Structure formats: structure tokens, C-alpha cells
Image (tube, grey):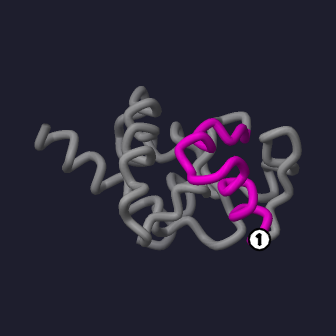
Amino acid sequence: MADNDNFFEKVYEVAMQIPYGRVTSYGAIAKYLGAARSARMVGWAMNASHTRDDIPAHRVVNKAGLLTGKHHFEGTNLMQQLLESEGVKVRDNQIQDLEKHFWDPWKELRETN
């Protein structure tokens, strides 16, 4: 379990850097962490993050922009409401104009670090 805890913390470090009004995917975080086949584990980390207020889990979606984690938020549409409050349009549980809002940690964090 200690390995999972360490991986989860690395996921959280990336998630906390997602800018306001932007989203990324489970797979993009996994790729950045050198674990490209671990998108599902990133999802587990995001699910476990709901006890912490500092992690913007609502900004992590699947590769098609679907709000696959929305059932882990309180209320029916909290994830969508949080995204829309940041200017991200959502229709039928999917980010609209995903390319415009997508934040790729592989590109963004490698350029700044």
C-alpha cells in the first residue's frame, strides 16, 4: 500500500498544478509520471482525493473529455458546476472544446521545471 500512497501523492502534486479553467486526463497525468498504462490508478487517486480540499479533482476527466468521475462528487452535478464556474462548457457530461481547455502536464510541466 505504501507504493500506492506514494503514487497517489505524485498524482496530487500534478493535479494541484492544473490551472483554473483547464482540464487534463487521467492518462495524461499517468504519462507525465512515467506510468503511461496507469490511467486507472490515477482515477483511483482522484477518487481518494475527496477528503482533501486542495486537490482540484474536478479538473481531471477521461481522454474524451467525459466527466467519468462525477459520481464521486456530492450532489448530482457538482463536478460540472465547478468546471462551468471556471468557464469550461459541459454538455451531456462532456467537456466542449476539449482542445481549448486541455492542459498537458507532459508539455506544460517539462517546460517550466
Name the residue: 44% across, 48% down: 46
Q: Position of residue 88 (x, y in %)?
A: 80, 61
What crowding class fits label 1: few (fewer than 14 Cα within 10 Å), some (14-19), or many (20 or more)? few
Name the residue: 13% across, 37% down: 1
Along the line of sight, which residue is nearer the eye, 102 or 67?
Answer: 67
Name the residue: 11% across, 43% down: 2
Under mark 1, the amino acid is Ser
Q: Position of residue 83 (x, y in %)?
A: 72, 61
How many discs mark residues in the rendered view? Answer: 1
Extreme-left residue of the structure: 2
Along the line of sight, which residue is nearer the eye, 84 or 39?
Answer: 84
> Is 81 one of the magenta-colored residues?
yes
Q: Secondary structure at mark 1?
A: helix
Name above or below for residue 20 compared with residue 75: below
The residue to which callout 1 is attached is 85
> Is 55 one of the magenta-colored residues?
no
Name above or below for residue 39 compared with residue 102: above
Q: Position of residue 74 (x, y in %)?
A: 57, 53
Q: Left or right? Give the position of 20 relative to 13.
A: right
In the image, which residues are magenta? 65-86
Name above or below for residue 12 compared with residue 28: below
Quadrant in the rendering for residue 30: top left
Name above or below for residue 69 compared with residue 102: above
* Quadrant, the C terminus: bottom left
Q: Position of residue 28 (x, y in %)?
A: 53, 43
Extreme-front residue of the structure: 75
